[in-house]
């Protein structure tokens, strides 16, 4: 979007998402032969994360939206799946620890850091009229934002 420097929270979110994509790709190589999930599905998920990193680095609001909420949802889903796998004794503790620290934690960190005030401002999600942060888009691709407080569109 612009040549200004991204805040630390955006860098942390990008690095966390890259770590999660790397772990996802690594797990694809290790478990795809014995898993119900095929190799292409694992790689597709890692590729989606890589596209999110690209969009976050470029400052796209749509990438912010997906990066903020999809990562939270995915971290919760992986955590629940991991818990079920441990409870059923289908996965070893070492794999659960690798998933927790390599996938769940980075995804949760991405979601949290994209919600920081610096990240919200960098993505242009602060209303220019009343200075209230928003997460509401005015169009489908989130090219324009709409303030919940005053209705301003920018």
Image (cartoon, rainbow, N blue to C red):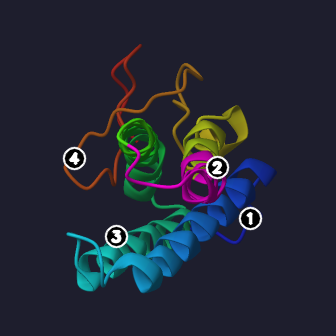
If the image is split into quadrants, where does the N terminus sit? bottom right
Position of 122 with respect to 139 (left or right) is right
* Residue denoted by label 3: 45
87 or 44: nearer the viewer? 87
Q: Any mark on residue 139, and which?
A: 4
Position of 94 with respect to 127 (left or right) is right
Residue drawn at x 57%, y 42% as measured from the top left: 108
Marks 1/4: CA distance?
25 Å
* Residue denoted by label 2: 122
Q: Secondary structure at mark 4?
A: loop
Label whose residue precedes the other's in the sequence (1 or 2): 1
Label whose residue precedes the other's in the sequence (1 or 3): 1
Q: Main secondary structure of the magenta part?
A: helix
Q: What span is in magenta?
A: 89-106
62 or 32: nearer the viewer? 32
Residue drawn at x 54%, y 42% as measured from the top left: 111
Q: Secondary structure at mark 1?
A: loop
């Amino acid at each position: 979007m612009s040549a200004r420097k991204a805040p630390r929270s955006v860098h942390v979110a990008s690095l966390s998402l890259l770590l999660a994509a790397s772990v996802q790709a690594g797990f694809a190589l290790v478990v795809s032969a014995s898993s119900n999930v095929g190799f292409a599905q694992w790689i597709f998920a890692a590729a989606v994360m890589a596209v999110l990193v690209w969009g976050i680095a470029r400052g796209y609001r749509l990438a912010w939206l997906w990066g903020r909420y999809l990562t939270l949802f995915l971290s919760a889903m992986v955590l629940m799946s991991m818990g079920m796998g441990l409870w059923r004794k289908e996965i070893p503790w070492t794999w659960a620890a690798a998933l927790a620290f390599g996938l769940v934690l980075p995804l949760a960190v991405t979601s949290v850091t994209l919600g920081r005030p610096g990240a919200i401002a960098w993505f242009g999600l602060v209303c220019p009229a009343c200075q209230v942060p928003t997460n509401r888009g005015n169009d489908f691709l989130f090219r324009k934002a709409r303030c919940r407080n005053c209705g301003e569109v920018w």
